[in-house]
Image: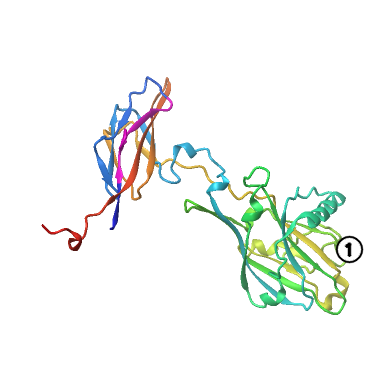
Amino acid sequence: MKIRNSIYILTVGAFLVSCNDLDVDDSVDFNVSLASDNTYEAGDPVVFNFDGNPDYITWWSGEEGHKYANRERTELPLEEIESVTLSFEAQARYGRVTNTLSLFVGDFPGLSKDVTTDDSRVADFESDATLLSGNGELLESKFSNRTAVSFDLMPYCISEDTHSISELTLAFHYKADFDGTNALKRWDFYSVAIKTIYKNGNTTTLNLSDLGLQTFDRNPNTNPKHAQQGDPYFDNSSRSSSCTGVWDLRSSLTRVNSFMYLGGGTNETDYTNNADDWLFTKSLKFNTCDPDENSGVLKNINVRLPSYSYVYTQPGTYTVTFIAGNQNVYGSARTIKEVAFTGKASPAPEAPGNQASG
């Protein structure tokens, strides 16, 4: 039997219409109602009847993204999150040295810009963090061409103590010894994104510019001919040309959501040393969301509005909020009213062939 979606006004026992005064100011004459005996099929207009004539009416439809109760919400609970995924494309080129790249996830306090302190923090992170690429996910042989890869971050987002979403840091680690003969690999990264999918179907995406990337080189190049000049925080972002042996964030300014690590070549012996380079994100939390927004202004002082009609295309339970107010040179006042109704599924008429004959 086919099911057709319908929206019904809730009454006691069967359907119920509720109108709540959330913020009452007696000087604002306003009320809202729905006919208690009406039913609405999905796609049909729902009519809200107004009493009073306030200067303005703003409303929240109760649909996803337009719920008054969520107007200040900036985080979602763990139960509402379906998945968190890091994805990017990468290509490993040129050099012969392999097993250069690792990806970690863990708790990191950030870089203090004090070299001794930060060297200790990075060492602790390497010891305590979880290696995401421990099964060969970032072997150079898999990235001879530009190749997409993804990592499930959901298991690492959950705090065991509070069973809630916890903050975490991602870090790429480029480590390789230069033997003076074999060039170090170059890695290019593109389309970097972290996508959170919620169970209500909504998504949020963090792109490269949202990640707050910072670099730290535990073995910086001190050769006076090298642009790094012994600076462990050097990321080449302020230069117009490339620089070997460092994380190069300059490319993120010219190619959207991309960066690279330039390994050293054999023709640059004086400029190349053993690599121990880290690239950290800032501490990230993946359940952040934008506060819900209102559905618009229905009237202003120049308009009289006895009712408003709106079409809900999906069945479900809706709490609809109306903010009505008056304003003049002496001050302002407002009142907030809510109407709740729900949608149910009703049987569609049976096909003629299924009807019983008399």
- Which of the 4 image quarters holds residue 280? bottom right
- Which one is in front, 272 or 329? 272
Q: Mark 1 packing: few (<14 Cα in 10 Å), some, or many (20+)?
A: some
Kindly identify the residue that appears in the image at 35 percent across and 50 percent down: 314
Q: Residue furthest left?
A: 358
The three-letter code of the residue at mark 1 reads: Thr
242 in the magenta segment: no
Kindly identify the residue that appears in the image at 47 percent across and 51 percent down: 200
Element class at badge 1 = loop
Residue 355, given in percent of the width and then of the height, sits at 17, 59
Kindly identify the residue that appears in the image at 44 percent across and 40 percent down: 67
Q: Does residue 261 appear anywhere in the picture?
A: yes
- Which one is in front, 353 or 213? 353
- Which of the 4 image quarters holds residue 40? top left
User: Is residue 277 depicted above or below 15 in this figure?
Assistant: below
Kindly identify the residue that appears in the image at 37 percent across and 19 percent down: 26
Residue 25, given in percent of the width and then of the height, sits at 40, 21
Quarter of the image for the C terminus: give it. bottom left
User: Is residue 325 depicted above or below 138 in this figure?
Assistant: above
User: Is residue 294 depicted above or below 194 in this figure?
Assistant: above
Residue 211, given in percent of the width and then of the height, sits at 65, 54
Q: Which residues are magenta?
A: 7-23
Q: Is residue 354 left or right of residue 98?
A: left
User: Is residue 306 depicted above or below 239 in this figure?
Assistant: above
Q: Which residue is mark 1?
A: 222
Residue 52, given in percent of the width and then of the height, sits at 29, 26
10 in the magenta segment: yes
